[in-house]
Image: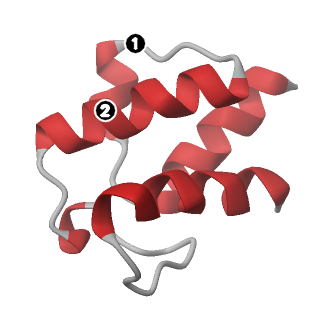
Amino acid sequence: MEIEKKFIEILRKKIGDKEVKSDTDLRGLGIDSLDLVEIIMESEDVFGVQFSNEELNNFQKVSDVVKAIEAKKA
């Protein structure tokens, strides 16, 4: 849950104060591909993980990113 909170904080820097839950669709937040890359790059720095381009393309929801971070940190 801590990873999710931190990731949502990173997201909010881009999207403002919109409501975000684990099942929130990233594209539904108005995030374009450049925004997503910037968000993921910051997340990689914060969490100390790396994502491939293929993984980036599979991120649809907040929970997808959180699960991927958790798996890499395990």
- Quarter of the rendering occupied by the C terminus: top right
Name the spot of residue 41 as percent of width and height, x first. Answer: 42, 24
Residue 18 occupies which quadrant of the picture? Answer: bottom left
Query: Which amino acid, mark 1?
Result: Ser
* The furthest residue to the bottom: 19
For residue 5, above or below residue 17:
above
Residue 24 occupies which quadrant of the picture? Answer: bottom left
Q: Is residue 55 left or right of residue 64?
A: left
Residue pointed to by mark 1: 52
Classify 10 Å Cα crowding around label 2: few (below 14), some (14-19), many (20 and above): some
Residue pointed to by mark 2: 38
Query: Which amino acid, mark 2?
Result: Glu
- Quarter of the rendering occupied by the N terminus: bottom right
* The furthest residue to the right: 74
Q: How is the image coloured?
A: secondary structure
Residue 33 occupies which quadrant of the picture? Answer: top left
Residue at 24 percent across and 71 percent down: it is 29
Q: CA distance from mark 1 to mark 2?
A: 14 Å
Residue at 66 percent across and 34 percent down: it is 69
Secondary-structure class at tag 2: helix
Residue at 59 percent across and 52 percent down: it is 7
Q: Is residue 2 left or right of residue 35?
A: right
> Which numbered tag is attached to residue 66?
none
For residue 41, above or below residue 50:
below
Classify 10 Å Cα crowding around label 1: few (below 14), some (14-19), many (20 and above): few
Q: Are marks 1 and 2 in contact (CB under 8 Å)?
A: no
Name the spot of residue 46 as percent of width and height, x first. Answer: 66, 29
Name the spot of residue 17 as percent of width and height, x first. Answer: 41, 81
Secondary-structure class at tag 1: loop
For residue 67, above or below residue 42:
below
Residue at 70 percent across and 28 percent down: it is 47
Question: Of callouts 1 and 2, which one flags the residue occurring earlier in the amino acid sequence?
Answer: 2
